[in-house]
Image (cartoon, grey):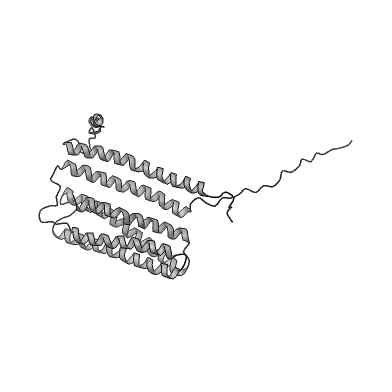
Amino acid sequence: MTSSTTTLPRPPTVLPVRRPPVIESAVLGTLVAIVTELMFFTALISAYYVVRAATGNTWVPPEGVRLPVATTGLNTVILLLSGVLTWRAGRLFDDSRERAARAFSGAIALGAFFVVFQGYEWVKLIGVGLTMSSSVFGATFFFIIGAHALHVAGALIAMMVVHHNLVKGKLEAPAFKAMRIFWYFVVAIWPVLYKLVYFP
Amino acid sequence: MTTTLGLLIACAVCGAGGNETSKDAFAATTVLMSAVPLASMGLLGYYLVKRFRAQDPSDPEE
């Protein structure tokens, strides 16, 4: 009795070519988050328009209240400068982490100034009687501006963590890029809200 | 659009429909809220496809 075994030729070993990721996970996650944030702010803006339209032509601050248009305009410039410094930090990241950290700390400082100054303006407005419950105008004003201020404050906390990692040399490029993208969004949405709320 | 406004102002909670400005605001924001999610998701998808196509497949990950 003979046993014959047939040996099939082994297919050539072909290792799959792994393509690099199309986009870093941190950046993709941030972009998806920004899409949802965009929808959130669009909903706020839409609600503002509908409520304002429902009041007819009487959409003005309550008597005795003047919105700080000029000072908030200046604050807007400061926030935009913070965005510019963030962009600068991104440009410097590959060449000099130290200089990038310096530019980024400037961006954080300007962002912090923005949110503290907003708080100061709020205290003054509340002092003259504009509150969430004083009128529909007050409610929409504080809700829209407050929603943005919360985003600024949250982003600043994240930026401080990123800055800490940058100084310690533990920060990876995608994480820094993701942080910058989110800050650009927070900075870019502000002039739209400023125009909407402060120039009714 | 104007022919569908009668349906749009059926919204019971927003108070739209009280006047012409209100109708216009409601119609405009309906368009805005419909377009922004589609546009933003579309742009993100387009960006990802563009990045994928721009990649050189012969340049494997290390």
Image height of A8 relative to A199, above or below:
above
Question: Residue A72, position in %: x, y?
Answer: 22, 60
Question: Looking at the image, which residue is at 20% across and 43% down?
Answer: A51
Taking the spot 35% from the left edge, 59% from the top edge, the residue there is: A155
Q: Is residue B35 above or below residue A97?
A: above
At 32% from the left and 39% from the top, the residue drawn is B34
Question: Image quadrant of residue A101?
Answer: bottom left
Using the image, determine if residue A171 lies above or below residue A136.
Answer: below
- Residue A165 in the figure: left or right of residue A2: left
Q: What is the quadrant of the N terminus of chain A in the image?
A: top right
Residue nearest the observer in this picture, A37 or A71:
A71
The residue sitting at the left extreme is A63
Where is residue A142 shown, x and y percent of the image?
A: 22, 53
**Is residue A64 shown left or right of residue B49?**
left
Task: Classify residue A92 by image quadrant.
Answer: bottom left
Question: Relative to A100, is B17 above or below?
Answer: above
Residue B18 in the figure: left or right of residue A82 = left
Q: Position of residue B14 (x, y in %)?
A: 22, 39
Instruction: Report the number of discs.
Output: 0
- Residue at image position (21%, 51%) is A197
The residue most toward the right is A1
Q: Which sits in the foreground, A88 or A24?
A: A88
How far across and down, in percent of the image, does residue B53 sit? Answer: 51, 46
Residue at far top of view: B3
* Residue closest to the eye, A84 or A176: A84
